[in-house]
Each structure stands twice: as C-alpha cells, then as structure tokens.
Amino acid sequence: MTLEVIDNLARLGEIRDQWWSIAQTITGLTPFQIPEWLITWWSHFGTGGRLHVLVFREENTMVGIIPCFRHQWNGRRQITLLGSGISDYLEPAIQPQYSSAILDRLRSHLETDSDWDICNWQDLYSDTPLRRLESNRTWEVLIGEDTECSEIPLTGSFGAFWEARPKHLRQNLRRDKKRAEIAGGLQFETAKTAEPEFTNGLLQLHAARWQRRGEPGVIAASGSAEFLRDIVFEFARLGILEFFSLRFRGKIAAIILSFVYANTIFFYLSGFDPEQEAMGFGRILLFEALRHSHEKKYNSWNFLRGNEAYKYYWGAQRIPKCRLIVTRTS
C-alpha cells in the first residue's frame, strides 16, 4: 500500500479519471463524493487553504482517496474534508477490501506528519471505516452524531405509496391542486440541461423566499451562487442533473434542483415564489416530482441533510451520520 499526498490542483486534475473510476466501483457513494463536485468546490472555496489529498494505491492501482485540505481555523492547524459545509455526504471513496490497509497507512501518515493540530471530518456514514482510527499516544479521537439525512424508498406503485401517506397531507394536496386549477392551472416540467432560465429561476426564488423571512438563505450565507452555476453545467455534461419545475401563468413558480446518481434522486435545493406561498406550489411540485421518479423507476428519493418533519410525512427513512474529530496530543 502506497500513499501519494497531492497538494496542487494540477496534479489533482491528472488523477481525475482514476478518481472517477474508483468512485463508480464503491456502493453507496453520492454525487458529493465524485471529483467533479469536489474539484469545483475547491476552485470556489479553497482560498486560504492548501490541498492535502491522500491517494492510496495497491500495486499502482488507486484503491482509496481521502480528499482534504489544510487551513487555519480557530487558531489551530486543521485538516478538513473537501466539500465541507455545502455537501451532504463526505465519506471518502475507499474500496472496502482495502480499508484495513488504508487505515494503517493513514495512521502512519498522521503520526509522521506534525503539521496539524486537528482533523475535523464531517458528514461521514455512521459505519465509516474511519471509526477504527482509535485514540493512541499521538492523538485523541472523538466520534459523535452528525446531522442526519433521509430517503424515501421508491418501491411498489406510486398509488400505493400515496395512499400510505398521512390523511392531512393528501387532503392539503387536493386543496392546493383545486385552488391552482381555479386560478389558472399549473404546468409540471423536467429538464436535464443547464439552461440559464432554470438556474436563474432557482437562485431568484430561493433568495426571495428567505428574504421574506428576514434571513439570507443557504446560498447567500455560503456565497455559493457561482459554485451552483458551475456545478449545474458540470452535472448536465455528465448527465446527472435534473430540474423539476412548476409554471404558473407561464412563469416558474416553484423549482427543485436535483442530481441523479446510482439511480437515486438527490434533492439538493428548491425555491418557490413567496408571493404565492398560500397556493402550496412547493407541495404540489414535490408530489409531481415523486410521481415522476416512481415512473422512471429510480430506487429512492434522497432528501439529504436535515430532519424536518415534512420529510417523514412523505415517507422518508432516517440515515444516521457521524463526525470524526482527531485532536493531536503530542
């Protein structure tokens, strides 16, 4: 088992194809763990940090990658996973049969590299092999729960799925649809292209909704608008982008940005016209998007991070996550 430490973007670009190939072999990975997402993230948010990407090889074949960067945070030298903050899954791509050897090589690296005070690695799977990185004479390990994700299995017929939803949800949807028909009707659309109308509509509606609440919203708070424009283009090129939208009187009134990966829909971001909030467009759009996903025979609908109650009304099941903090003691 060999370890290459990559500290520059040019070299990271050279291994992109190998990285993509290994990601396709590992069950359970998401679009947030592929090179297009993480390299684009670094190009927008890497200012002030230094790449520290750990590439593990067995007989010159990549078998694992832990993509990190070094930076100063709260007065300490921290190693953080690429994608932190706006990515919902950050489990490193490690082929399971090599996890023990990779952990041994990682321990050796952390012991001999003294240029760090803390590794703070978030959004890991609850059963991550990194749990085996136990406390020793060099560091202390703390493993805690992180913000959960959730997912709806898309099994059986959509009719059976919908009949199993709470009565109040079904009643509210009928009311919303009837009101929309009286007011002028709605048009449901899907799109897999990076047309500016959809990206601009998402950014505008998302911002308007949060401004009405007196809050910045996640896009403004993270400064991620330009990142989103770039990732929409990248994912459209890869064929893993899908917009769901509702038009009301010819204009986009509600929209969902999602990614399709490993036959799962990942619901990343949404927006709807706050002036029409009483019309329930967000609820109608989610219903139509789920029906479409059933018809396309996707395996599941992943709501990503957050334990909002509405997700569980729609049939979501909890996906526990964890955070690993390794603090150097000597």
Image (cartoon, grey):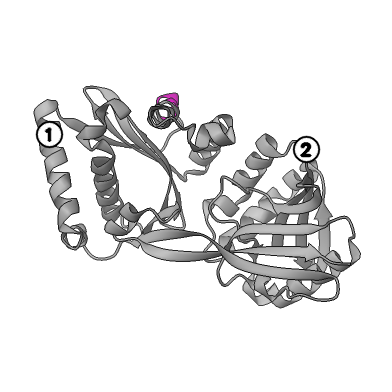
- Image coordinates for residue 296, horizontal then vertical, percent: 30, 53
Which mark is first along the chain, 1 or 2?
Answer: 2
- Image coordinates for residue 235, horizontal then vertical, percent: 51, 41
Does residue 45 appear left or right of residue 263 in this picture?
A: right
Looking at the image, which residue is at 67% across and 43% down?
Answer: 39
Does residue 323 appear left or right of residue 282 in this picture?
A: right
Residue type indicated by callout 1: Arg
Looking at the image, which residue is at 90% across and 60% down?
Answer: 114
Element at badge 2? loop
Element at badge 1? helix
- Image coordinates for residue 316, horizontal then vertical, percent: 34, 60
In the drawing, what numbered circle is on residue 179? 1
Tell me the quarter of the image containing the C terminus.
Answer: bottom right
Residue type indicated by callout 2: Gly
Tell me the quarter of the image containing the N terminus.
Answer: bottom right
Q: Which of 87/65 is in front?
A: 87
Q: Residues within 10 Å of mark 2 (few under 14, many from 20)?
A: few
Cα–Cα gap, marks 2 and 1: 51 Å
Does residue 34 appear left or right of residue 167 in this picture?
A: right
Q: Is residue 63 visible?
A: no
Question: What segment carries the magenta color?
Answer: 195-200
The number of numbered badges drawn on the structure is: 2
Q: Is residue 269 visible?
A: yes
Helix, strand or loop for the magenta stretch, by majority: helix
Examine the rendered structure and indicate whether residue 311 appears above or below residue 140. above
Say whether residue 130 is magenta: no
Examine the rendered structure and indicate whether residue 96 appears above or below residue 284. below
Q: Using the rendered view, name the quadrant where residue 179 is placed.
A: top left
Q: Which residue is mark 2?
A: 48
Q: Using the rendered view, name the quadrant where residue 136 is placed.
A: bottom right
